[in-house]
Amino acid sequence: MAGGNAIRGTRVGAGPMGEAERGESAPRRHIPFYCANGHVTRVSFAVEAAEPEHWDCPRCGLPAGKDRENPPAAPRNEPYKTHLAYVRERRSDADGEAILEEALAKVRARRGEV
């Protein structure tokens, strides 16, 4: 048996909201951004808003720029460096040998092996 309430399942305030209820929308402009993989992303900005130089491509994540012919290059990822790699950048093999000899001399002195 069908109910007699025609607006069943709705709530107060539900319904189509138009410009009359929300007010006028700001004028917009659409700026295309191009990534190195050839993807085009059109981003909507308010007319008064400053547009950024770069935008992240939503499809591949690379940076995208406004120049179709020269999109920004992908950022270079530095490989993980170990502590030893950083030490080798700062010290030469000769420095390492000298530090090792100094540490061994201290250990021998504590043990009385001089």
Image (cartoon, rainbow, N blue to C red):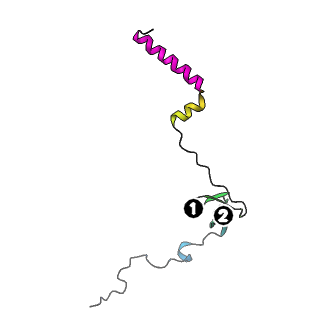
Q: Which residues are magenta?
A: 93-114
In the image, is 99 to the left or to the right of 8?
Answer: right
Quick check: 103 left or right of 49?
left
Identify the element where label 1 is drawn. loop
Give the alpha-carbon distance from disc 1 to disc 2, as whole Å.
13 Å
Q: What kind of residue is marked 2?
A: Phe
In the rendered structure, find residue 89 and report the number of the disc placed on it.
Answer: none
Residue 3 is situated, as x and y percent measured from the top left of the image, at: 30, 88
Q: Secondary structure at mark 2?
A: strand
Which quarter of the image is occupied by the C terminus? top left
Q: Going 63% across and 55% down the picture, which residue do you hit? A: 74
Relative to 42, say whether 84 is above or below: above
Quadrant assignment, res 37? bottom right
Answer with mark 1 or mark 2, whichever residue precedes in sequence: 2
Q: Which residue is identified by label 2?
A: 33
Q: Position of residue 107 (x, y in %)?
A: 44, 15
What is the total number of numbered labels drawn onto the structure image? 2
Spot occupied by residue 82 in the image (x, y as percentages of width and height): 51, 37
Residue 61: x percent and y percent? 57, 59
Q: For the N terminus, which image quadrant?
A: bottom left
Which residue is nearer to you in this view: 8 or 20? 8
Please give the residue where the numbered disc 1 appears in the rendered image: 60
Residue 52 among those drawn in magenta: no
Image quadrant assignment for residue 14: bottom left
Position above or below: 63 against 12: above
Q: Is 113 one of the magenta-colored residues?
A: yes
Q: Report crowding for label 2: few under 14, some 14 to 19, many 20 or more residues within 10 A (C-alpha).
A: many
